Image (cartoon, rainbow, N blue to C red):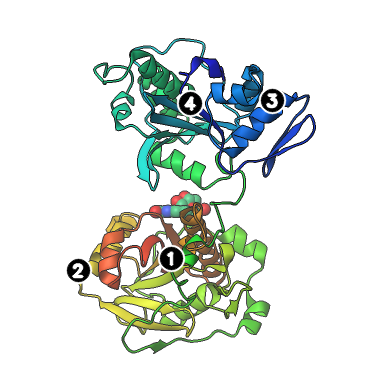
Amino acid sequence: MPTATYPQQTRFALRDGITCRTGPADAILLDPPREAKLTGLDAGQLHALATLNQGPATVSELSAAAGGDDVAELMGRLADGGWLSVTVRDRGRDLYTLRPFGPPAPRPDAPLPWSATLSKFAVLHRDSEGFVLQHPRAWCDLRIHDPRLLALLDGLGAADVDLPIDVKSQFTDDLHWCGFLVPDADAEDRESTTRGGSLPELWFHRRSALGAHTLTHNHFDPTTEAKRRFPQLPARNASHPGDAIDLHVPDLSAKRAEDPTLTAVLEDRVSTRSFDDAHPITLDQLAELLYRTARSRGTRLSDRGEEFDSRPYPSCGSGYELELYPVVRKVGGLSPGMYHYDSFEHVLRPVVDADSPVVTEVSQPTSSTLPEGAEPQVLLVMAARAGRVMGTSEQAGYAAIREHVGVLMQTIYLAATAMGLGACAQTYPDTAPFATAAGVDEPEACAVGGMIIGSPARR
Ligand SMILES: Cc1cc2nc3c(=O)[nH]c(=O)nc-3n(C[C@H](O)[C@H](O)[C@H](O)COP(=O)(O)O)c2cc1C
């Protein structure tokens, strides 16, 4: 980073979280897991580093601390390693700050064309410190202190912004350098379409993975961030009112001996879309499927006082946020309607009657999966108690929920295959009617997936 190109009032600082330890002729910069050793430092450079260690300073303040020596070489080394944040100022006022989280990209060779526009992946939002501009592929965040700069986010087209032209050029050059401004919006569009990824997808991917922005689990997962502010949700969902329907408990010892082999189950598993409605699944079969796949096997307290559940399928951090709501159309021995499966007591509790329009709305999207728009005998709606997971995870919580849906789907597929039942995964539940039917706020229990279950059509 050529620090000399910035206006004289620009302040440089060691980026947040860095510890700088100096020796007789060297220094170590620590930001675990990253660290860098600066060797061959003279007394002036060590004094300049000590000044930076105390807080932001201009180049002339650092040079004064160095006894009048030129600090450009030291600043270049710090900037190239991504250790410096830069606050550009005008007439004593902070304009914007580049906050790197890794080594910067090389400065683009070509000048920024007038046609340059804000990248479609850039996101501007406010946090407790003010405006922050972020990009999932950028090597830094950009803090905007002076709202006049907001008019320049889409390039230099807004030339009537009341700022000196060199400040405006510096800002747009930096936007380009950091990846926020792209020279050709159509090219970016083509690239992102052919290589996959819309704005939410790329953000979701980057936020739920470790990378340049997130090297460690700090502010990532599992941080139990919300735990300090809100009590953790208990492992057990509050019971729905209504009389519990006791369910058959299968003899698992007998199943161990009788079940088809793992290879047979894996090889025979398919998605079933044709069902034998004249001989539908029975309540005992539904009970066995729920018991074998989704019952709670018991809770335990972690060292940190978190309540961990255990079920037949795995769950990140033992969160087990998924609840099953069977929407029953045709089950031998059970009235139609929507039920909640209480995985702790292994009972069903009625939630909504079959004639309620919301029950139809919940199950309707699945009919497009079945021949001639048939109704499923049972649709198991998977609903996430997001608070079980979001409270422990700052960034990866929603990704974990989606992973759990896949894990539970496959567990149900395999158990259904072993039992001779038909199953078909369902991706797109309609979340709003489900929330209405279940009588919950969407964040409290949001529909995230489903499984059609029934007796398969005879071949
Ligand atoms: C996560 C996931 C979501 C799925 N969503 C649907 C769906 O919404 N509708 C559907 O008909 N099939 C759905 N399926 C089933 C797939 O279409 C099916 O697994 C695939 O065609 C392979 O066929 P097979 O399961 O018979 O081996 C889903 C499968 C998975 C794993």
Q: Residue at x 26, y 20 (%)?
A: 162
Question: Which label's residue is closer to the chain start, 3 or 1?
Answer: 3
Q: Choose top left, top right, bottom left or bottom right for residue 131.
A: top left
Please report contact status of discs 3 and 1: CB closer than 8 Å, yes or no.
no
Distance from Cα at disc 3 to Cα at disc 1: 50 Å
Question: Which label's residue is closer to the chain start, 3 or 4?
Answer: 3
Q: Which residue is mark 3?
A: 45
Tell me which amino acid carries mark 1: Gly
Q: Which residue is mark 2?
A: 357
Q: In the image, is the residue at mark 3 within 8 Å of ligand 1 by its beta carbon?
A: no
Tell me which amino acid carries mark 4: Cys
* Relative image position of residue 134 (x, y in whole percent): 43, 36
* Relative image position of residue 35 (x, y in whole percent): 70, 38
Q: Choose top left, top right, bottom left or bottom right for residue 338.
A: bottom left
Residue 325 left/right relative to 42:
left
Please report contact status of discs 3 and 4: CB closer than 8 Å, yes or no.
no
Q: Residue at x 32, y 17 (%)?
A: 156
- Label 1: how many Cα within 10 Å (few below 14, some 14–19, many 20+): many
Tell me which amino acid carries mark 3: Gln
Q: Which residue is mark 4?
A: 178
Q: In the image, is the residue at mark 2 within 8 Å of ligand 1 by its beta carbon?
A: no
Q: Residue at x 41, y 13 (%)?
A: 112
Distance from Cα at disc 3 to Cα at disc 4: 28 Å
Tell me which amino acid carries mark 2: Pro
Distance from Cα at disc 4 to Cα at disc 2: 52 Å
